[in-house]
Image: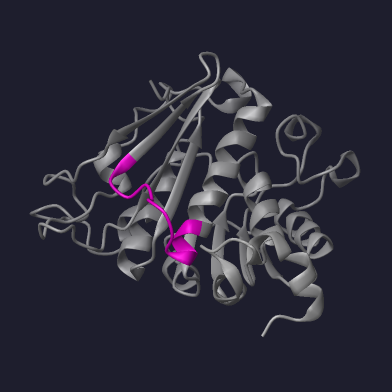
Amino acid sequence: MLSSDEIKRYKRHLLLKEIGGQGQQKLKAARVLVVGAGGLGSPLLMYLAAAGVGAIGIIDDDRVSIGNLQRQVAYTTASAGEPKAERAAAFCRSLNPHVTPEAMPFRLTAENALEIVSRYDIVADGSDNFATRYLVNDACYFARKPMVFAALGQFDGYLSTFRAFEMDKEGQPLPSYRCLFPEPPPPGTVASCEEAGVLGPVAGVLGTLQAVETIKEILGIGEGLVGKLLMYEALSARFQTIALKWDPDNPLNGRNPTIRDLSIHRHEQSGEGCAPSAG
């Protein structure tokens, strides 16, 4: 049941026929894991907490720095030097006392990913390096958890939802992140955000859209982004959605899969960097 304070807090949700009381109860019961509490994670966490998502896991092993604050709006100048996961959890609690954030100020690894991912209903990946993206994708596949993914470029970004453990209406597997990027780019070919730069509000746009898609997945409303890639280009003020198809040759859920557990990730390099251009 919703308390009187929750009814007052979520009034604008309760007025929506697509949400109402039952939908708000679904949000309250939901468990979402947010991977990365940076430029994408900041607005994502804000809106998940504000929406009343009951349990929010926050995993990030980084600390706040002054150079983050141009885009990582969940933090203040006074937070510099503190663990991002802990400061983000404190922000969620201050915004909404009815949610329970869990700070995990350590790195997601091949050893812990499956156990952590399995504790949640949905995973929202806002990580900033290819190794973590592949790890999250593969862990979600093996744990059979939906993954709402977003990534940034300098002035652009893209978004998709992956349910690669399911089939489409024709009985064909749904795509995974490995269908979008079969393999990471060679080391040194993609500049890091620190090297290339990023327009701060672009992170806000993509992180907010990621929150929308995560909430839609929880509620089962609207048309999601499974099998689609949403691309945003800030300089041209343009959104574009294209079809994302299953790659039968991908090593995870292709016709002849070679990835059968997470052991492959024990040997991969981090490959940190901003997302390649979305178009």
Residue at the far right in the pictured view: 78
Give whichever of 45, 263 is nearer the camera. Answer: 45
In the rendered image, the vertical position of residue 159 relative to residue 135, given as above or below: above
Q: Which residues are magenta?
A: 216-228
Pick out the residue farthest to the top.
236
Give the total number of marks visible in the rendering: 0
Snapshot quadrant of residue 266: bottom left
Q: Is residue 32 visible?
A: yes
In the rendered view, does 244 fall on the left or right side of 38? Answer: left
Q: Is residue 221 magenta?
A: yes
Q: Compared to 75, does 101 lie above or below? A: below
Q: Nearer the viewer, residue 243 or 126?
A: 243
- Side of 209 where 194 appears, left or right: right
Residue at horizontal 84%, vertical 42%? 80
Q: Is residue 126 magenta?
A: no
Residue 134 at x, y percent in the picture: 37, 48
Residue 126 in sight here: no
Residue 142 rendering spot, x and y as whole percentages: 31, 67
Q: Where's residue 210, x and y in %? A: 53, 47
Magenta stretch, overall SS: loop
Which quadrant: the C terminus?
Answer: top left
Give the quarter of the figure containing the N terminus: bottom right
> In the displayed structure, does residue 55 sit left or right of residue 128?
right
* Residue located 53% across and 39% down the image: 128
Task: Using the rendered view, name the quadrant where residue 188 is placed.
Answer: top left
Q: What's the residue at 54%, 43% (across, down)? A: 209
